[in-house]
Image (cartoon, rainbow, N blue to C red):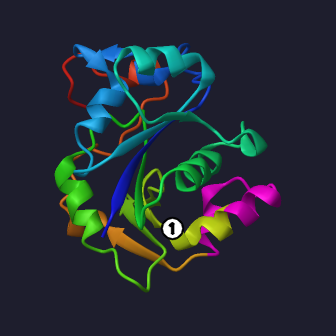
């Protein structure tokens, strides 16, 4: 089973005030905290145009802007672009602003991938977490359809797919592991929330 990790770093980060992916936290950029916790294998980054030089300077090779036809269409555009540009069976999609995720959770999540499922989504504190989730390549036509119909919310996509929802307790999720960073004040000084 070939899985490609996809880091979504294409947002404007308006509330944060600067691109979140490049913000240095505890000695390294936020995206590196995320990248270190992903599955073995290739990682691709879907970047905001302003961040391309930053990622290239850090030696990242697989860095792409959203496909021009869907640029500015949010996370679905990033997932679409990754699937269009990189062949794989499954894609572990994560936002660049989730620095507390753990490799153990990614591995546990991947164990739920099978042929009758299009997406594997964690359920944490009664909320689906579609931006740390696995999507099968067969979901690409549905993503494309959502983008064409201007249905840009991931929940619209999930209604079209066969989704395996995995409760947090089955994944042994750490407290606040799925906390994402929207504002600078969301980053605790000591690294723990």
Q: Residue at x 53, y 21 (%)?
A: 52
Residue 84 percent coordinates (x, y): 59, 54
137 displayed left or right of 168: right
Q: Secondary structure at mark 1?
A: helix
State the residue at coordinates (30%, 74%). Answer: 112
Residues 133 and 84: in front is: 84
Q: Quadrant of the N terminus?
A: bottom left
The spot of residue 93 in percent (x, y) is: 43, 51
User: For residue 164, which quarter of the picture?
Assistant: bottom left
Q: Position of residue 80 (x, y in %)?
A: 61, 53
| Residue for badge 1 | 137
Q: Is residue 32 above or below residue 114?
A: above
Region in magenta: 144-160
Seen from the viewer's position, the closer of residues 159 and 9 is 9
Can you name the residue that lies furthest to the right here?
149
156 falls in the magenta region? yes
Q: 65 and 125: which one is in front? A: 65
Residue at position x 71%, y 53% from top? 152
């Amino acid at each position: 089973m070939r899985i490609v990790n996809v880091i979504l770093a294409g947002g404007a980060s308006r509330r944060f005030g600067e691109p979140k992916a490049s913000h240095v936290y505890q000695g390294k950029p936020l995206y590196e905290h995320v990248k270190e916790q992903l599955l073995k294998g290739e990682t691709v980054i879907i970047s905001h145009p302003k961040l391309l030089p930053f990622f290239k300077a850090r030696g990242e090779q697989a860095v792409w802007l959203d496909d021009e036809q869907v640029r500015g269409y949010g996370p679905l555009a990033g997932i679409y672009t990754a699937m269009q540009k990189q062949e794989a069976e499954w894609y572990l999609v994560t936002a660049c602003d989730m620095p507390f995720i753990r490799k153990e959770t990614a591995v546990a999540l991947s164990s739920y991938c099978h042929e009758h499922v299009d997406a594997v989504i964690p359920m944490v504190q009664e909320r689906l977490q579609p931006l740390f989730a696995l999507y099968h390549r067969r979901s690409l036509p549905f993503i494309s359809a959502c983008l064409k119909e201007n249905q840009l919310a991931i929940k619209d996509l999930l209604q079209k797919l066969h989704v395996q929802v995995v409760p947090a307790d089955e994944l042994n999720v750490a407290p606040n592991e799925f906390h994402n960073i929207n504002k600078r004040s969301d980053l605790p000084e000591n690294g723990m929330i």
